[in-house]
Image: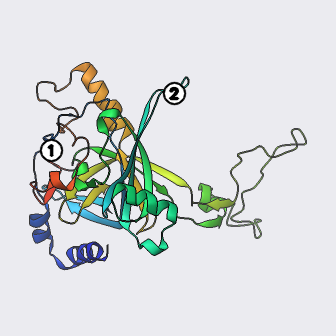
Amino acid sequence: MQSVTSSLRLWSLAQPLQSARASIVRTFATAVPSTTAETWTPRTRRTGVLARKHGMTALWATDGSRVPVTVLELDDVQVVETRAYPATKKQPPRHTVTVGCTPRKAKTTSAALLGQFRRAGVDPKMRIAEFEVTEDALVPEGTTLSAAHFVPGQHVDVQAPSIGKGFQGVMKRHGFAGLRASHGTSVSHRSHGSTGQHQDPGRVFPGKKMAGRMGGRNVTTQNLMVERIDLEHNVVYVRGAVPGPPGSFVRVTDALKKVGWKAQMREKRGLDREKGEVLEGVKGLPMPAGTVEMAASWPRDIQRVGNFK
């Protein structure tokens, strides 16, 4: 964790612009050969991963444009458990994959979790998370996932608790303009003003925007573009901001809308069928997951093909 952060800081501050462009801009094809009998389809739902947020930096495209990205590190992500639930009268059969992230000392881990890690044959982890998958995307227990799980050019959804701001007023919490900052306002410049109506109904309706606790809630940022993957440091660069403070754990999954739904729409309309592309610029996703063994023969850096406009 410290090595990735320090290397990013040194890269962003010490390298000149020309050398940074020359070292970071790689344009490889995003066609992903499948190493298993299963191939990704628009109806496939792969497992997500747990990653650690390392703050933001920037990439430069071939035309010189600057792209703000968030650095997400897959810190020793391993599959802890794979489960299949039979169908019931109310629900169809379900399949889940539980993954863990970041090594943890055994003496600080509860006995229940230690038993779960021993059954899977993995070291204790600081965080675990369960993801619902389809039957063709089940991953064996003990598998180590890498940054090759995501393909540059695809979109992802990132979920994490937002940064807590404590008790805040309406101007910061909801973007109110406030009252007049001139004559007659006294000491009420940042107040919310009236909150109700007349004697009828004589109360404040539920959901009224008022002062209160801000942040600290689970937030999902959808449809973030994967710009680059670094297989040596196991890092994924996604375009835009990600909820949570630096060092926090985030859940990263294939975008529900711009991967699942969009691929199904393209399949239905037959778009780019002759090119073999399931998404625009993407010919497939690693199945059933992107493992370290799969990424061993890949280039160190893979960046999205084309300009970043």
* Residue in front for this viewpoint, 18 or 182: 18
The residue indicated by pointer 2 is 91
Q: Quadrant of residue 193?
A: bottom right
Amino acid type, callout 1: Thr
- Residue 258 is left or right of residue 128, and the answer is left
Q: Earlier in the sequence, mark 2 or mark 1?
A: 1
**Counting other residues with Cα less than 10 Å from the Cα at mark 2, is it few (<14), some (14-19), or many (20 or more)?**
few
* Residue in front for this viewpoint, 239 or 228: 228
Residue 181 vs 89, above or below: the answer is below
Q: Which residue occupies 56% across, 65% down?
A: 164
Element at label 1: loop
Amino acid type, callout 2: Gln
Q: Quadrant of residue 266?
A: top left
* Residue in front for this viewpoint, 18 or 73: 73
User: For the view shown, which residue lies furthest in the top direction?
Assistant: 269
**Counting other residues with Cα less than 10 Å from the Cα at mark 1, is it few (<14), some (14-19), or many (20 or more)?**
many
Residue 30, image x, y percentages: 15, 44
Q: Which residue occupies 44% across, 34% down?
A: 94
The residue indicated by pointer 1 is 30
Residue 78 vs 262, above or below: the answer is below
Q: Quadrant of residue 153?
A: top left
- Residue 136 is left or right of residue 86, and the answer is left
The disc label shown at residue 301, or none: none
